[in-house]
Image (cartoon, helix red, strand yellow):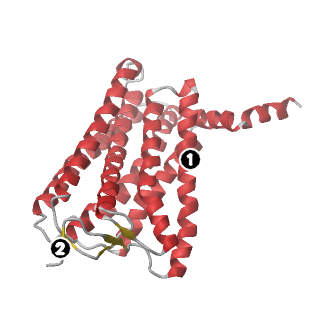
Amino acid sequence: MNCSKTPDFVLSGMSSDPENQQFLFCLFMPLYLLGLLGNSLLLLAIGTDIHLHTPMYFFLSQLSLVDLCFTTTTAPKMLEDLWTHNGSISFSGCLTQLYFFAVFADMDNLLLAIMAIDRYAAVCYPLHNPLVMRPCRYGVLVGISWGVAHLVSLVHILLLSQLSFHINQEIPQFFCDFGPLLWLSCSDAQLNEDLTMALAGVLGISTLFCVISSYAHIFHAVDRVPSAQGKRKALATCSSHLSMVILFYSTVFATYLKPPSTSHSSGELVAAVMYTLVTPTLNPYIYSLRNKDVKSSLKRILGMESSLDYGSSQ
């Protein structure tokens, strides 16, 4: 009863109070623009500076591209809903948003694991790393990751499109996500739920194992370095990536460490905002503020380096 294959939904994750919506719009709009600016500048810096054409920065440029797309998948619709006080979204629009959301979320996960392996190779095998991580090899790694992310997302969307959903229902989130949609299904969604948990488990556990294993080897190698300066230098090459890993996985666990079809709480909504908007916005600034090469490239792009040189020569 009251079910449809192509229902319309209402995204009701944010506050329904107009004053709160105005406040949230003023809060999230600058945050979204900061994310666009930071990731775009990082992409430009890496693309135009030949000194940054290394595996680490190639992976970082891919992460910036993914973060740029990730926030653009959810933030514009959220901002539109806050501005117009209308969270309606069509079924096709919901599935489209969900498809790209899943692709970029999986890519974030896979890229962080690849970057952890790259840091492991750079710290533990510095002499062999340039021979192992050749452009063709890390290009293949990223290409496979894109293929896996698209394939997993496509499987989810094809299965979701076969379900029927209650009509005129609210999604307790500010974007379309698997859990709320399965919760609103009036079909048997057990297969979808099992597959969601299985694929998330395989991708999540395997990538997390790569990250933990890589850093276990890194810390063991650093512990054997005799000088304190050498230890600090080795750890400095990993600090930015480790910060990103902690931010990403802590918010993901807070959002998704439960069965997909259970109801959502306000705490999970805050975690979702952190996961989809705050973390992708912070990532480029974490890397640029802690990395001398990136800062130097950004100064050159922004014209600050030449002005500083000119000032010092006066």
Of the two numbered discs 2 and 1 in the rendering, the one whose residue sits closer to the viewer: 2
Tag 2 secondary structure: strand
The N terminus appears in which quarter of the rendering?
bottom left
Q: CA distance from mark 2 to mark 1?
A: 44 Å
- Which amino acid lies under the numbered mark 2 shown in the image of this protein? Cys
- Crowding at dot 2, Cα within 10 Å, few <14 / some 14-19 / many 20+, comes out as some
Residue at point 40% right, 33% down? Answer: 119
Name the spot of residue 287 as percent of width and height, x first: 53, 43
Name the spot of residue 26 as percent of width and height, x first: 58, 68
Question: Please, is residue 135 above or below residue 84 in the view?
Answer: above
Name the spot of residue 82 as percent of width and height, x first: 49, 71
Work out whether residue 195 or residue 86 is closer to the camera in this orientation and state it. Answer: 86
> Which residue bears the numbered disc 2?
3
Work out whether residue 113 or residue 120 is closer to the camera in this orientation and state it. Answer: 113
Residue at point 46% right, 37% down? Answer: 60
- Crowding at dot 1, Cα within 10 Å, few <14 / some 14-19 / many 20+, comes out as many
Q: Quadrant of residue 192?
A: bottom left
Question: Please, is residue 92 above or below residue 82 in the view?
Answer: above
Name the spot of residue 229 as percent of width and height, x first: 54, 34
Q: Is residue 302 visible?
A: yes
Question: Please, is residue 309 above or below residue 70 in the view?
Answer: above
> Which residue bears the numbered disc 1?
38
Question: Please, is residue 240 above or below residue 85 in the view?
Answer: above
- Which amino acid lies under the numbered mark 1 shown in the image of this protein? Gly
The C terminus appears in which quarter of the rendering?
top right
Q: Quadrant of residue 184?
A: bottom left
